[in-house]
Image (cartoon, rainbow, N blue to C red):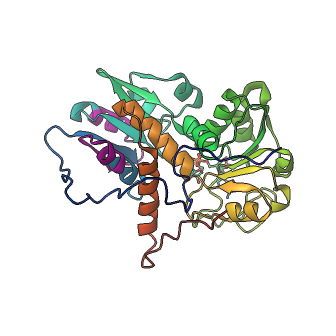
Amino acid sequence: MSEPKRSGGAQRPGSTDRDSGAGPVSEPTAGSPVWRPSGATRVVGVIGWPVRHSLSPAIHNAAFRAVGLDWAYVAFEVGPGRAVDAIDAMRVLGLAGLNVTMPHKADVGAALDRCTAIAEALGAVNTVSRRGDALIGDNTDGPGFLDAIRLDEGFDPVGRRCLVIGAGGAARAVVRALADAGAAEVVVVNRTPERAEAAAALAGPIGRVGVAAEAGEADLVVNATPIGMPDSDEPTPIDQTPPLLPVEPAHLGSGQLVVDLVYHPAVTPLVDAARAAGAVAVNGLGMLIHQAAHAFRLWTGEDPPLEVMSAAALVELGSRNEGSGVPANLPKKD
Ligand code: NAP
């Protein structure tokens, strides 16, 4: 297999390429009017618990400013079990759209007027938009993942062997998206076998349950577990490779694309190990940006300013790295 090629699309999240054309994303330039919310401002947001560390407000507000929309994006902390109340509030308050994150993705559907076929199939809604008075539930995780591998990494899933580790909401969206995109095989690896079976079934006849050691035969390896996140330090039964790796690096190498859906730290243990093994490896920031771009288009009907959104996420992540002034989330150059 040839090395995955990079092409256009978003500034590659985590890349050090500053030549994207993305200007300042949160500060007004000299002479430019400062945006202030007005009585006509359209409001969108995200509901989740917890949600105050979400990158989405930074990403979307930068996008609204960049394209000159009088829109604002805010985070609403909505406690467990309150998803339906939140959708009722959305109707009353006239919110133009919502993102939905844990723990509400499975619950909001019941309160909506209808859901797209993919949201129905996944049993999860991550984006709510308005069509007239109707509220429509959609799921942009799969399209966001596909855009990230196609546009940012030049990886076409058609005819490719794919291995996905995890069987939760993100994994299910990725499994289904890869199957719909024409992958030859989607192998699902998960510590809970029943959940692996259910996720693999989303890929139809090309889906099956497997083990992490099969990663060596895959063109694309995706980590859709939290392993590698700073607070994920419990030992994993997958491949028995402590610390904090969902797959043994010996199964990774040249010619593979490895995508870790975790994006903080920018260079996750898996990304680091996969690069050391010779694979092309990226974190999940690309998927985050592209799923946000799909939501932006659904809500506003406008083309999303991908470079601005990507730069805003990097700035926000960098600002969370207290003190250094250097966005430590930026990975080593490939
Ligand atoms: P989820 O629904 O809770 O699923 C988590 C999955 O990880 C489950 O399959 C679980 O296995 C597995 N898992 C958790 N801890 C594990 C461990 N210590 N060892 C082995 N397996 C473990 O979560 P999710 O929403 O799918 O999210 C998964 C990851 O993707 C998170 O890190 C999340 O931040 C990331 N994500 C990124 C994006 C993006 O845009 N980049 C979008 C969505 C999610 P069991 O089934 O056995 O419990």
- Per the rendered image, the range of residues in magenta is 62-90
Q: Quadrant of the N terminus?
A: top right
Horizontal and vertical percent position of residue 284:
58, 52
Horizontal and vertical percent position of residue 101:
46, 45
Residue 113 location, quadrant: top left
Can residue 54 be seen by looking at this rendering? Answer: no
* Magenta region includes residue 244: no
Q: For the point 79% across and 44% down, which residue is it?
A: 219
Q: From the viewer's side, name the closer residue of 330 and 76.
A: 330
278 to the left or right of 90: right
Horizontal and vertical percent position of residue 228:
64, 62
Q: Residue furthest bottom?
A: 323
Residue 38 location, quadrant: top left
Q: For the point 53% across and 66% down, which residue is it?
A: 329
Q: For the point 41% across and 40% down, which residue is it?
A: 99
Q: From the viewer's side, name the closer residue of 248 and 114.
A: 248
Can residue 248 be seen by looking at this rendering? Answer: yes
Q: For the point 65% across and 32% down, which residue is it?
A: 176
Q: Quadrant of the C terminus?
A: bottom right
Image: 181 above or below 306: above
205 to the left or right of 30: right
Image: 299 above or below 261: above
* Magenta region includes residue 70: yes
